[in-house]
Image (spheres, grey):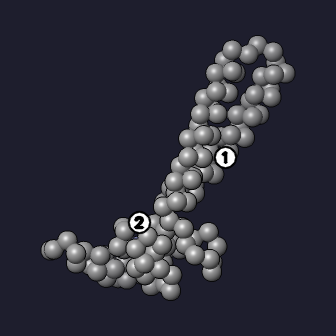
Amino acid sequence: MPEDTKPIQTMADLLRQGATLTELSCPACSSPLFKLRNGKLWCAQCQKRVIVVKEGTSPTEATGQVVLGTLESTVLSKIQEIEKKIREETDPQKLEKLSSLLSKLLENLEKLRKMTRT
Ligand SMILES: [Zn+2]
């Protein structure tokens, strides 16, 4: 099958799987977005999930993912820093502060991961 007929095939497959065509268009390629049965938006042309922050607002795609990716690495590096401090720290009070900070960061990391993973 020639490369350029692939998206059409994918669209047909999506519809067969119960996805619906939405009025939204992909910010990257302007092709119509599909709503998958799990509620996620999908661009058949880009073969990518598209994130819409709020119903009715324009979809943000790659940029949103990039920001979340950067945030994730920031949180990860902070976790590493704190982990190192915890290892060196002997004062119980400081340790307690560090570990509560660590658990907050881990929570954030978990949230971020839920947002970025499909
Ligand atoms: Zn697209």
Q: Position of residue 43 (x, y in %)?
A: 41, 73
Name the residue rendered at 40%, 79% in the picture: 31
Amino acid under disc 1: Asn
> How packed is label 1: few (under 14 Cα within 10 Å), some, or many (20 or more)?
some
Q: Whole-percent x and y of residue 74? A: 60, 40
Placement of 16 over or under 47, stated as above or below = below
Residue 48: image tag: 2
- Please name the residue that numbered disc 1 is placed on: 108
Q: Answer with mark 2 or mark 1, whichever residue precedes in sequence.
A: 2
Q: Nearer the viewer, residue 95 or 60?
A: 60
Q: Give left or right: position of 56 versus 66.
A: right
User: Which quadrant: the N terminus?
Assistant: bottom left
Q: Does residue 88 appear anywhere in the picture? A: yes
Label 2 CB-ligand 1 distance < 8 A? yes
Q: Quadrant of residue 46?
A: bottom left
> Which residue lies at the image location 76% right of the left edge and 13% below the top edge?
90
Q: For residue 88, what is the image quadrant?
A: top right
Q: Which residue: 66% across, 17% down? A: 87
Q: Position of residue 12 (x, y in %)?
A: 31, 82
